[in-house]
Image (cartoon, rainbow, N blue to C red):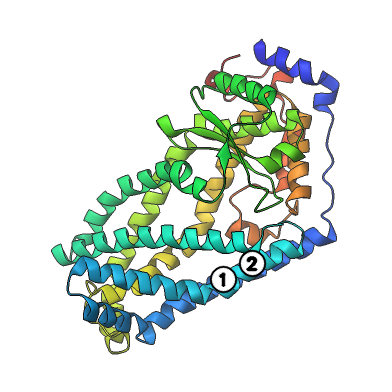
Amino acid sequence: MEGDRGSNQTAGVGEAQALVSIPEPSASALEYYWVRNSLWGIDLAWGIAVLALFLFMGWSARIRDFAGRLTRGRVRSALIYVAVFSALAALLALPLDFIRGYVVEHRFGLSDQTLVKWLSDQAIEFAVETATTFVTVVVIYALLRHSPRRWWLYASALALPFVFVIFVVDPVWVAPLFNKFGPMKDTRLEARIHALAERAGVEGARIYEVEKSVDTNKVNAYVAGLFATKRIVLWDTIIRQLGERQLLFVMGHEMGHYVLRHGQQNVILVWALTVLSLYAAYRLCGGLIRRHHARFGFERLDDIASWPLLSLVFALVMLVTQPAFNAFGRYKEHEADRFGLEITRDNRAAAEAFLRLQQQNLDVPRPNPVLHILRDSHPSLAERIDFANTYRPWATGEPLVYGDKFRR
């Protein structure tokens, strides 16, 4: 078979099946792990506290009044409200964002990003998020005024195409705002990835090399977009750090996400969580407003000053559902690992790729079980290396789980 010939050209059978040991994490990796998780907990608590401050201190109502004094038009008033609210929220989050995204990454040697580039990225992210929030606010409050009882149903119906558009737009138009996307410099490797993509049924996808080293020393690659916008993306850091065989496994894994329709599943899952959040807001916000309206500074949910209240409910729903969301993510990653192994049949290259991820990204192979459930959308590296070492049904003549998904 073509796949067998391709594997034998790059590695002998014994080499491809040689086991890779799971190393213990370095002292730096352990320290980075606990610092990062501590900052995650602080960030989570601070984000909820900031929304509560906007509500219980009456800040949101004051921003509404300020916008109302500047203009009487609802859309223009909403634009001013969202701009001021987003700016204040961003300023309150900035110190923690700076510590987490700049100080810590430099402290552990994971980034050489300049302060100017970091600030530029923050400004772009702020502009994108503010524009998205503005559209969301205009639509939701129009629905609230139109139908106080069924607004969440109408918003749910509109959320599906909105989420779909975001998944399509983000990799094509938003991601290039932060980094330079260009053709691969190694044309021979590009040809091999194209050949693998054709075997995987990912025809017509463009391959991009991203200049990510200006931001980070970590490694990553992904397949993004849907239908005509699909693209294979490799950070320049992963091309430098991984060998060709390891890269081909990573590409097989990422193509597995596309072939197994994980992108479409993500759209449906995010939409379902959005529907749940909207329904929770419908059920909970009325009672909270009746109890605390004097402190909030508004008496109706269709008052734009209620936006922090809606955001708070959305955040709490996401927090409660995050373990289930993560569990599904770990399942998808495991199946993409299976796909990558079946299409490349290079167990050692797969295990070595995970080993390089551990070393380069300062990951720990066996994370804290509770934090793993709460935070991780990927299986632990120990689990992935074990699976890469042992999964080879082709060696015993067993059928492949995804053998019908790619050309042999």
Name which residue lies at 49% across and 64% down.
319
Residue 390 in view:
no
Q: Nearer the viewer, mark 1 or mark 2?
A: 2
Residue at x-position 48% and y-position 71%: 90
Q: Where is the C terminus found, in terms of image quarters?
A: top right
Q: Earlier in the sequence, mark 1 or mark 2?
A: 1
Quadrant location of residue 280? bottom left
Callouts 1 and 2 close, C-beta under 8 Å: yes
Identity of the residue furthest to the front in this view = 116
Q: Is residue 35 left or right of residue 126?
A: right
Q: As shown in the figure, which amino acid type bears the numbered disc 2?
A: Arg
At a point 66% along the width and 34% down the height, the residue shown is 250
Among the 4 quarters of the image, the one containing residue 88: bottom left
Taking the image as shown, residue 216 lies to the left or right of residue 275, namely right
Secondary structure found at label 1: helix
Q: Residue lying farthest top?
A: 1
- Quadrant housing the N terminus: top right
Mark 2, residue position:
100
Question: 65 or 297: nearer the eye?
Answer: 65
Q: Which residue is mark 1?
A: 43
Q: Is residue 35 left or right of residue 310?
A: right
- Who is closer to the viewer here, 164 or 405? 164
Q: 236 above or below 151?
A: above
Of residues 253 and 187, the one nearer the viewer is 187
One can see residue 199 in this view = yes
